[in-house]
Amino acid sequence: DAGVTQSPTHLIKTRGQQVTLRCSPISGHKSVSWYQQVLGQGPQFIFQYYEKEERGRGNFPDRFSARQFPNYSSELNVNALLLGDSALYLCASAWTGGTGELFFGEGSRLTVL
Amino acid sequence: EDQVTQSPEALRLQEGESSSLNCSYTVSGLRGLFWYRQDPGKGPEFLFTLYSAGEEKEKERLKATLTKKESFLHITAPKPEDSATYLCAVQGGGSNYKLTFGKGTLLTVNP
């Protein structure tokens, strides 16, 4: 079975641009979460979606937004990119929106110049 | 706010030299404590979930234990392929939709 898939794997943007990252969860999983991982740090929670509804949002500015589609795939959008947005963006899926293991994709490496 | 502190930040072992990684946490109503392994440039790989103090889980050379304040990941007779960053995370009762991660322990096992 396919795991969590993310695209693109790597991308380079300049300050002020906008980026869209995509995620397909494991088949049957209805919950998708997004995390940001800066080099040398642990992942930091950005959003969780369950059954297409936002269930939680971390301490990130409004430049960050996300949505979940009827097929449970998800997109993360970041507007007006800053140098500090350079990070590995991880998508994770789970069976439910509550307690349980998260299964992560390989991530999208974003570099902002 | 949930907090996770991992120690040491880095650990270098010789092949076969057993050791333990520590994860201290503060959380309001623990719903679960999770251990992940992360290889460079990759996403975290799920290892274990622990739910209550006294619980233990094992997988090959790894054993995770849990108390009310901390968790340990014991590595017995490690091999070079065990080299990775090990991440600890908690899911609190007040935020059942997210994991709070520590910074991780970078483990290097030399042959």
Image (cartoon, coloured by chain):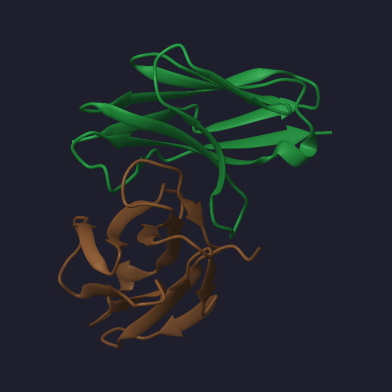
**Residue positioned 34% across, 14% down in the render:** B68
Left or right: A79 as drawn, with respect to B49: left
Give the quarter of the figure containing the N terminus of chain B.
top left
Q: Is residue A10 above or below residue B68?
A: below
Q: Quadrant of residue B86?
A: top right
Q: Position of residue A98 (x, y in %)?
A: 31, 45
Q: For the view shown, which residue lies furthest in the left direction?
A: A62
Q: Quadrant of residue B107?
A: top right
Q: Is residue A76 visible?
A: yes
Q: Quadrant of residue A31?
A: bottom left
**Residue positioned 62% across, 51% down in the render:** B39
Q: Is residue B14 above or below residue A100?
A: above
Q: Position of residue B37 (x, y in %)?
A: 58, 42
**Residue positioned 66% across, 63% down in the render:** A1
Chain B's shade in the image?
Answer: green
Q: For the view shown, which residue lies furthest in the right direction?
A: B111
Q: Position of residue A91 (x, y in %)?
A: 43, 63
Give the quarter of the figure containing the C terminus of chain B.
top right
Left or right: A16 as drawn, with respect to A6: left
Q: Is residue A20 above or below residue B6?
A: below
Q: Is residue A24 above or below residue B64?
A: below
Which residue is nearer to you in this view: B27 or A31?
A: A31
Q: Position of residue A62 (x, y in %)?
A: 15, 71
Which residue is nearer to you in this view: B103 or B10?
A: B103
**Residue positioned 75% across, 27% down in the render:** B78
Number of on-image labels: 0
Q: Is residue A113 visible?
A: no
Which residue is nearer to you in this view: A106 or A52?
A: A52
Task: Tell which chain the image draws in brown.
Answer: A
